[in-house]
Amino acid sequence: MQVTVETTAGLERKMHVVVPSERVEVQVTEKIKQTAKQARINGFRPGKVPLREVKRRFGAGIRQEVSSEMIQSTYGEALQKEAINPAGMPKIEEVNIEEGKDLEYTAVFEVFPEVEVSGLENIEVERLSSSIEEADLEKMIDTLREQRLVYAETDRAAAEKDQVNLDFEGFLDDEPFEGGKAEGTDLVLGSGSMIPGFEDGLAGLKADEEKDLKLTFPENYQAENLAGQEVLFKIKVNKVSEPELPELNDAFFEQFDVKEGGVEAFRKEVTNNMKRELDSAIKAKVKDQVMDGLSENNEVDLPQSLIEQEVNRMRQEAVQQFGGGAQFDPSMLPAEMFTEQAQKRVKIGLIVSSIVDKNNLVADAEAVRETIEEMAATYQEPEDVINYYYSNEQQLSQIQNMVLEGQIVDFVLESAKVIDKTVSYDEAVKREAELPADEGDESPEAED
């Protein structure tokens, strides 16, 4: 087998492979013999079909099949022979499978770049530290109670934050429109679940009262037949309920898997959860700064094939996150939505891989065990969880990668400029940015 490799541009390579015709014909002949044993052809007994007849009828297809198999196998051989590590799948071009001639093809692919990581001393990292004060704990408990509000029926008129049970039907040009009707639906005033003006129009209504609301759908509403249209909603209020904070009792504590120990055990459980969140947030912020610093201080040639793979992965993630379902084709999402972030991910991945390889970093087994035990401690049967991770190669690999990621961060911090800063709990766990709500997502009816 002859192999020649040409560097075309940047990371792209063209590898021309020539496989001797004798090697190909041996495989073709063997495949014809196998086919002859199985072929069912009128006029011939099973297993007694002459090879020449099999070749006449099926020869072209057999040669195509054998050639495809040989391209796959010899491509790997050629890469190994030339000590090439490709990035992504190849494009196979200029294929010649003519009978009696050598099998020839050209594989076009990209290779991984050589990455020399530098500039670690230029990376600046602000490392936060914080503690959980009594006020932080009380605030968290209040938040947990607010997230689990209960509603008690009242005779007074509806106001913001009240839950209103209502029937309604929408009309466009005096005709009911699809999706504009609901019966016995609950709506919390001020939740923003409905189009602008709907919830405001319910304020001041009492149970059994009715009202007509003239409203206009937003111009960017997702249903084109309703976008920008004036409609009429006929509304009947069934009942009004006011919010009440749940009591701190055993029934409330059980929602957090605290079944004994009362308020003291509950406060301890919340504190432990807050500590875990605090530690995780601080580590995440340090990691983000380290990764951004590595990216800013190193230039890397990025294989386009890896970027395309990452774009496709992000498309899949987006569909899963936003509930597109199996019927939604991720490729319908424009690549431009993900390209910049995909480039960043690929760049960081190549830099991190270089650090791991050149410094012989491996996940510390003891740290892996400690991480799994810490995670298992939050479950009722910790030992079962530990056994699960160690018996599941994929799950264990994820923990190992997470631990190795932490070791990489620690490795960079040894050379980076680290500034320690003490902040409040709220500031430590605060996200860097919040995603804005989609203005086109209003619905004419309350969501469940």
Image (cartoon, rainbow, N blue to C red):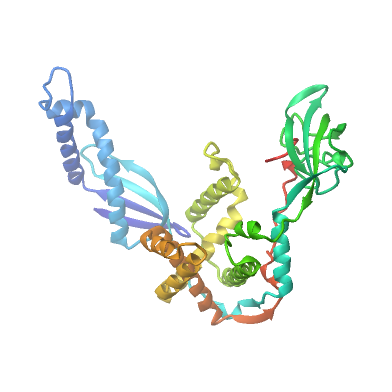
Residue 348 x/y as whole percent? 53, 65
Q: Residue at x 17, y 30 (%)?
A: 38
Q: Nearer the viewer, residue 41 or 220?
A: 220
Q: Residue at x 56, y 58 (%)?
A: 343
Q: Nearer the viewer, residue 149 or 389?
A: 149
Residue 395 in sight here:
yes
Residue 315 x/y as whole percent? 55, 48
Q: Is 92 displayed left or right of 25 in the figure? A: right
Q: Nearer the viewer, residue 82 or 41?
A: 41
Residue 113 in sight here:
no
Number of numbered discs visible in the structure rendering: 0
Instruction: State which quadrant residue 47 falls in.
Output: top left
**If the image is split into quadrants, where does the C terminus sit?**
top right
Q: Nearer the viewer, residue 254 or 288?
A: 254
Residue 245 x/y as whole percent? 75, 56
Check the image and name the residue furthest to the right.
204
Q: Residue at x 67, y 77 (%)?
A: 131
Residue 39 x/y as whole percent? 18, 27
Q: Is residue 423 above or below residue 20?
A: below
Q: Is 128 displayed left or right of 187 in the figure? A: left
Q: Residue at x 30, y 60 (%)?
A: 80
Q: Is 350 displayed left or right of 438 in the figure? A: left
Instruction: State which quadrant residue 57 falls in.
Output: top left
Instruction: State which quadrant residue 126 falls in.
Output: bottom right
